[in-house]
Amino acid sequence: MRVTFANASSYVVVVEHSGPLSLLQVPPQTTLLDLKLPSLRTVLKLRSLEHGKLASTSAIELTRPRLLSCKPWSSLSLPVESKIRVYTIRVSRKRRKVLILDRRDTASFLSEIPDTTHLSSVLLPGTHQTISFYGWPVSQCQVTTTPLLTQLLSGIRVIDVRLAMNDKSSTLIAQHGILPQKTPFSSILSSIHTFLTSPSSQRETIIMSIKQEDYAQTSQADFSAAVLREMSAAPGGLGMWYLDNKLPYLGEVRGKCVLFSRFGVSKGWENGFEGMGIHPTMWPDSNKSGFSWNCKDTLVVTNDWYNIGNFFSIPEKASLAAQNLVVINDPPMPVLPISFFSASTFPLALPSLVARGSGWPSIGMGVEGVNSKLGGWLIEVIAGDCQPLIEQDEEDMSLEKLGRGKQSISVLATEIPIPPPEAQMKGWALLDYYASPEAGDLVPLLIEANFSSRTGVAWS
């Protein structure tokens, strides 16, 4: 078992098992502990040190993965007041990799990042079709238990809002394709204002992408005018918004919502398109290789390949979206990657299957979803170059004899390449069913990448 402490505080670790106890002092820098799992049950007791004295204690129980475990990785359930998050990723039948992180406040993590940081330099979790709670299995992309305010408190900072005109009231309402999603645009704006004016999150920043869904019924001019009208009338008015057509620094947009306008007529907006927020100059439909465009002095590199054909393309989808977030070398201008980890093709690659997967993929009897693949990759990236030595034992070899191959033994053999040490991981990562595969455990990994010694803009 390999235990990695990434950016965690100083701990004393007590390892309890059937043999003698092991007491280990862990310094505050990234540290590795190589331990064998000598029995079916091992307990790590993490006793945090404050001013050289023992403070809080967290007990972490580790058991050998079950043969039919369907989780390539998971987080351990710890008390809410715990100061750490613990992730385990399966290496083989008896071996797991354990990553221990400080528990950051997902409602206010941007406050830890300097004002001088360019918006293109941070990694922001987002949701695709943020308000699409209805129409399973085709149109639903999020669950009703994660309304907008819950998403924001969970760490989501990029929201994807699709709107249409309500014929009866001439107001805007959330919609996905032809299916109304019941939430008025005014309610969305109210939730944004509530979050950005709360004491704990008033230094946060939100990016809102707005796209028109009812081109056949509503003219682009009427839609654009309705967006401006409702933004102006909402709590906070236009003063809540950043409307320049360029990427700002965090210090410029604390407590503000950055408009990302994927709709088209500028009449009525002050300064025209230059006053409609970040405005893409192109957006080809489901381009597998991605596309790029310039927003003033920033190159925006986008991957929105969603028509993947069938679930056999999930590994490639996850890999392309993840690799798009990696910027290697020192580019001549700022680069903002935007990656949609969502996909939908009827009937063999519906949103829930693509995001969540199904069955028992760790033993070759199921499909691992994009979100799970992303989570496993993030654990590897955050842990840095600390790759585990995978040794096959008798149980592992017996699995191979069953014809399930190495992929069933080591789900760490991810299809997503691990970036080199000099690379930075940044951009916007938009997810379907963002709270899966575990309840909110993927978003903290995306957040932590901002503080990683290998990739983070805020690491020190």
Image: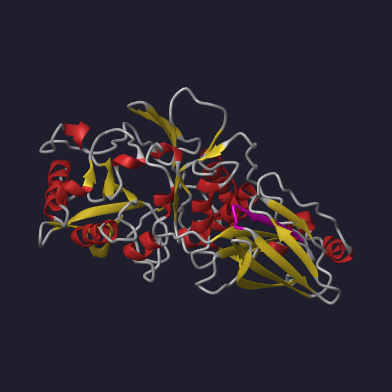
Colour theme: secondary structure
- Position of the C terminus by quadrant: top right
Whether residue 333 is visible: yes
Q: Which residues are magenta?
A: 1-9
Residue 365 found in image quarter: bottom right
Q: In front: 130, or 156?
A: 156
- Of 202 and 449, which appears nearest the observer? 202
Q: Nearer the viewer, residue 433 or 139?
A: 433
Q: Is residue 142 above or below residue 212?
A: below
Q: Quadrant of residue 82?
A: bottom right
Q: Is residue 215 visible?
A: no
Residue 238 is situated, as x and y percent measured from the top left of the image, at 16, 47
Horizontally, residue 399 falls left or right of residue 206, namely right
Measured along the vertical axis of the image, is residue 75 above or below residue 165? below
Q: Residue at x 49, y 44 (%)?
A: 458
List the single residue furthest toward the right: 394
- Could you tell me residue 66's position as x and y percent? 73, 73
Q: Residue at x 62, y 72 (%)?
A: 57
User: Is 167 part of what is drawn in magenta?
Assistant: no
**Is residue 7 found inside the magenta-colored segment of the image?**
yes
In front: 206, or 181? 206
Whole-percent x, y for residue 257 in the image: 27, 48
Which residue corresponds to the image point at 39% horizontal and 51% vertical from the top-left? 111
Which residue: 32% across, 64% down? Answer: 149
Q: Quadrant of residue 267?
A: top left
Q: Position of residue 429 (x, y in %)?
A: 46, 48
Quadrant (top left, top right, bottom left, bottom right) of the N terminus: bottom right
